[in-house]
Image (cartoon, rainbow, N blue to C red):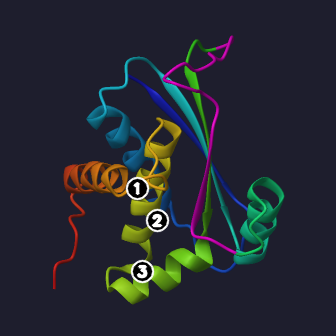
């Protein structure tokens, strides 16, 4: 399995270092591996500030507020279009708020790098069809998958 992750940094509030870029790619690949995704895949990750994610959230979801991450899956029910040039499945787009990542990393005491990795894993699971909005059971299942992937990449939950 090959995963092409294209990262766009469209903000200036948080330094998106080469290490953070590698971590985003690792998080995408590990999530697909943990979910036993069959085939090559492409994911786009865009890092924005709070004002931009608020605009996107309002335009796409009718929610006039900033959020930490948005997911825009290109597939449905496990069926994805293929890039005709590469043959890879186009899974969709992830949009991360750098400002939220910094604030949440501080709040939870694990820093911005781990928070961006977590938001990436969370969002890729959404691209694969997971949802935590409709039921508590779905939220628990998704959270367990997130923890599994975070452990795989060496970033377990900080329990104290």
Residue 74 in percent (x, y) is at 64, 31
Camera-side mark, 1 or 2: 2
Indicate the quadrant where residue 28 lies: top left
Q: Secondary structure at mark 2?
A: helix
Camera-side mark, 3 or 1: 3
116 to the left or right of 97? left
Q: Are marks 1 and 2 in contact (CB under 8 Å)?
A: yes
Residue 65 in percent (x, y) is at 72, 75
Number of labels in the image equals 3
Indicate the quadrant where residue 50 lies: bottom right
Q: Which residue is mark 3?
A: 105
Against 108, residue 45 (above or below) is above
Number of other residues with Cα within 10 Å of mark 1, as a class: few under 14, some 14 to 19, many 20 or more: some
71 to the left or right of 111? right
Indicate the quadrant where residue 130 lies: top left
- Quick one: label 3 or label 1, which is nearer the N terminus? 1
Q: Which residue is mark 2?
A: 116
Tell me the magenta residue range: 66-85
Q: Secondary structure at mark 1?
A: helix
Q: Secondary structure at mark 3?
A: helix
Q: Which residue appears farthest toward the left when viewing the image?
A: 160
Q: Which residue is mark 1?
A: 23
Q: Is residue 22 visible?
A: no
Against 89, residue 6 (above or below) is below
Number of other residues with Cα within 10 Å of mark 2, as a class: few under 14, some 14 to 19, many 20 or more: many
């Amino acid at each position: 399995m090959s995963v092409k992750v294209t990262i766009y940094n469209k903000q200036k509030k948080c330094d998106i270092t080469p290490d953070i870029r590698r971590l985003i790619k690792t998080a995408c690949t590990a999530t697909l591996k943990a979910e036993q995704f069959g085939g090559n895949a492409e994911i786009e990750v865009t890092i924005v500030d709070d004002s931009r994610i608020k605009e996107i959230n309002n335009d796409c979801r009718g929610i006039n507020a900033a959020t930490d991450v948005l997911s825009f899956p290109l597939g449905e029910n496990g069926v994805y279009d293929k890039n005709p040039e590469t043959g890879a499945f186009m899974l969709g787009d992830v949009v991360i708020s750098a400002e939220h990542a910094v604030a949440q990393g501080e709040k939870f005491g694990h820093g911005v790098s781990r928070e961006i990795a977590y938001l990436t894993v969370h969002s890729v699971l959404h691209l694969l069809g997971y949802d935590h909005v409709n039921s508590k059971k779905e939220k628990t299942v998704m959270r367990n998958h997130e923890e599994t992937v975070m452990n795989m990449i060496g970033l377990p939950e900080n329990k104290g």
